[in-house]
Amino acid sequence: MTKRKCPFIFAALCSSAALTLTIITACSGPQSLHVAIHPDDQAAYNALLKSGEESPRLAFYSRRAQQQGITTQEAQDADLALSSNPFSARRDPSAVSRGAVIFQSHCASCHGDGADGQGSQLPRPMPELGFHGFADRFAATVHGGAPTKWFRAINEGATSEPVNESGDVVEMPAFNETLAREQVWLVITYLQSLDYFAEGPYDAQANE
């Protein structure tokens, strides 16, 4: 009886080892911005920022209202109802691209262009603010990331551990007045994306 179980145990161990190897060697983190971002999405977000609204959030509500023929209040109410991510990082490169654009505009100065915690505004490189650590890679590969945790941090703000002996910290502002909830979910979709799934620069026409 024991001999019959061994092949199954061996197969299970092999599968587990293969999964771990994939996580460690293939899924190094979010897609690089030059791969993830499509120029049309960059241009569209730049236009949004120049729309004259007080914030990207209000500009988003205004544009969504125009697109759908609804009021700005209705657009805001629909956005506030988004309690989970409506996008898929593995199946929707357009969402990954739009999220990468927002990340580049509002997050990269601290989290780094490579989402590696080496942003120009940090007092020193802080890998703990990056998204290439094993825990994040494992979560993104197996569970699609840590969306609830990431959403709360972006929406409500967060504070780092002390960065030096003086006890100085790095504070991330709350983005709930800057970005719409859908925009936050788009950033998370980018963070959930993995280099492993990126075959090259995003081509919008290939997905039409």
Image (tube, helix red, strand yellow):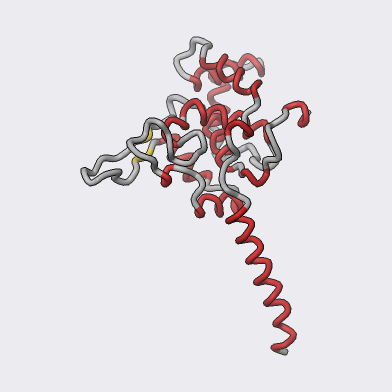
- Residue at the spot 52% in from the left edge and 31% down from the top edge: 103
Where is 122 relative to 2, above or below?
above
Where is 57 relative to 10, above or below?
above
Using the rendered view, name the quadrant where residue 44 is placed.
top right
Residue 126 in percent (x, y) is at: 39, 43
Which quadrant would the N terminus be assigned to in this image? bottom right
Residue 32 in percent (x, y) is at: 58, 36
Horizontal placement of 102 versus 68: left or right? Answer: left
- Residue at the spot 46% in from the left edge and 43% down from the top edge: 130
Using the rendered view, name the quadrant where residue 187 is placed.
top right
How many marks on residues? 0
Which quadrant would the C terminus be assigned to in this image? top right
Of 77 and 106, nearer the camera is: 106
Residue 55 in percent (x, y) is at: 46, 18
- Residue at the spot 77% in from the left edge and 26% down from the top edge: 205
* Farthest-out residue, bottom: 1
* Farthest-out residue, top: 52
Where is 18 relative to 193, above or below?
below
Horizontal placement of 14 versus 102: left or right? Answer: right
Residue 159 in percent (x, y) is at: 34, 40
Where is 53 relative to 109, above or below?
above
Of 152 and 114, nearer the camera is: 114
- Residue at the spot 32% in from the left edge and 46% down from the top edge: 161
